[in-house]
Amino acid sequence: MVDPRRVAIVTSVVAGLLSILWPMLESAFGAVSSGSCPLGYTSSSPLGKTDFDAASLHGLLKTPSSVGSTTVAYVGCRFMNTTGTSNMIVSSTGRVLAINSGSERALKVKFAGASIRRCHGKFIVPGFVDAHVHLITGGFALGALDLSNVRSKLEFLDALATNVGENGWILGYGWDETRFADVSSTPSIDWLRADGRFDGVKVWVIRADAHAGFASVAALEASGITKTTVVAGGVVEVDENGELTGMVKELAMARVQAVIPPHTAHDRQKAIRAGVSHLLSKGITSIGDFGDIDSLVAGPSGFAQLWKDFEVLAAWDANKTLPIRITTYMPIADWKSVASHEAWNDGFVRENATTSVISRVRLGGVKAFLDGSLGSRTAAMMDSYDDNAATSGKLMYAPGKDEQAFMNLARDADAAGLEVSVHAIGDRAVEQALDTLQAIKQANGDRITRRFRIEHAQHLQSPIDEQPRKFSELGATASVQPTQISLDKWSVIQKLGVDRASRAYAFKTFINNDVPLAGGSDWPIVGADVFDGIFAATHRDSWTPSEALSPTEAVHAYTKGSARALRMEGMIGEITIGALADFVVLDSSPLDTNKKPEVIATYVDGTCVHGRCLA
């Protein structure tokens, strides 16, 4: 394995040599599109911000004659922002060797022995990078009761009644009371009592935002929850008479989930495989995985399961049976385990110095939750909710000793070199996230590789530019999920009023303030389809159209932007000389948002891992 501590020195030497040798390399490999440097050091990836492992360059620097029999040439391909067709050459080590517009005959002479794959005018685009998913949770969701299309109380009850599991539980996810046509409230125990089909039945169904769930009387009794139960960091809802409603929020959800029959190890592996296949079918080649939601809600008692899931991925990677790149984030309270694990590797990718094979699994850092969600009214806001003046949401770390304890934890994790990511949806939580980063920088100074991520960054204070300016000044990344607009647009004005609603999902404001933007889904909270995300980011006609991104900006968020958030810029999320050959074959350009592209095939390290592979 390459010693990452030598990388900085070696990289600087190699970069200097390349600056001298670049004209010769360009001559050898043909004209390169966009005048890109082989390391991918473009204007958006300046020298020093791309963590290339210099030892991997030996595959790039071989002469054409020495790699000819092991290269693959993709000919007659179209690329974004270009006219006509070009060819792409991929090495046996899974790196992009060259991009040129020469004839196929000339290409065969230059790369004698190269295998030919014909695009026939189809588009090749960088493999998409989803900066935020919950892989195993998404895998389980593919086979679970999906309530996302339920549109009434009656549909809700009928769906539950026809889906009693073999274990006696009714389990599901995705309901959203703001989409119900006949009621305006969250589900209630009274609904079940009046129905008659649920006597003694254990019901546990998760809301669309995964920050709240609805439980039947039998489920609450099994979990030991009563009307006097208090859970730190959670909410057990009672009505005006002090009686249970069945709604359980945030960390209190762990009480119910703890008594549900657990999944077997085999079931978990099947869910991971299903999740990976689903993501590849969407053209996603790299993800930031934030772990099983049930295990996260369980707190420290869930850490062991998170690590077991990670070790399964690591074993598949070691056996070369994992077809996707995964950067995993663990709970911040367990940061010492992350820092001491070999997969952390000081944040660098791990590469076999003999084969040049790069590990597809790595630890990226740690994550903390600062608040909840808008839909559950647990997103921490500066002011009370318009439709419930009794609450302004829930800050997980209240000002004072709790907040200070969290900031100390984040400071220590950062001091160990770990990347810190925080969930912050409400404007009060976003401010706490920025205060945390400021405290980190004051304690630990600047670090060019720091990728402090604020997940969601959904609601901003007034004036709208104030917090984005702080993002930019402090170096925070806004990790956003455009498709989630569909969860909130039906109720945001009711919950927050017109003024505050106008400062939600402020993508263009972030861009205008030079804030790095990473695109993701939070799958399975919403679907993982990248093109749905691009469409949501670019079509804001019904909600703050001034915040719409251009197609180029939206695609950038799901490629280079997310690659940077994962600290892998220059390696993934772009097609440039020296980058990993992770790409997707489409029937049309993703920049044309009037037509949803079809994913024809998905490639990782130049190997077809999904779809109708090019021949």
Image: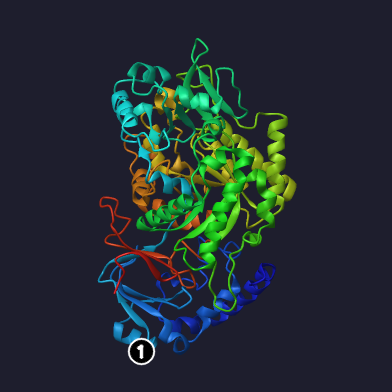
Name which quarter of the figure residue 174 lies in: top left
Amino acid at pointer 1? Val
Is residue 547 visible in the rendered image? The answer is no
Left or right of 254 on screen, residue 71:
left
Q: Position of residue 480 (x, y in %)?
A: 47, 44
Left or right of 155 on screen, residue 578:
right
Residue 80 vs 529, above or below: the answer is below
Residue 592 vs 197, above or below: the answer is below
- Label 1: few (<14), some (14–19) or many (≥20) C-alpha neighbours in 10 Å: few
Name which quarter of the figure residue 203 lies in: top left
Q: Residue furthest top?
A: 241
Q: Position of residue 42 (x, y in %)?
A: 50, 65
Q: Quadrant of the C terminus?
A: bottom left
Q: Quadrant of the N terminus?
A: bottom right
Q: Position of residue 404 (x, y in %)?
A: 71, 35
| Colouring of the image | rainbow
Q: Which residue is mark 1?
A: 109
Left or right of 21 on screen, residue 282:
left
Q: Position of residue 509 (x, y in %)?
A: 47, 41
Is residue 413 visible in the rendered image? The answer is yes
Q: Considering depth in this image, is 173 or 588 the residue closer to the camera?
A: 173
Q: Considering depth in this image, is 529 or 257 the residue closer to the camera?
A: 257
Name which residue lies at 32% across and 37% down. Answer: 541
Q: Considering depth in this image, is 479 or 397 the residue closer to the camera?
A: 397
Residue 26 vs 410, above or below: the answer is below
Name which residue lies at 44% across and 26% down. Answer: 499
Name which residue lies at 57% across and 36% down. Answer: 430
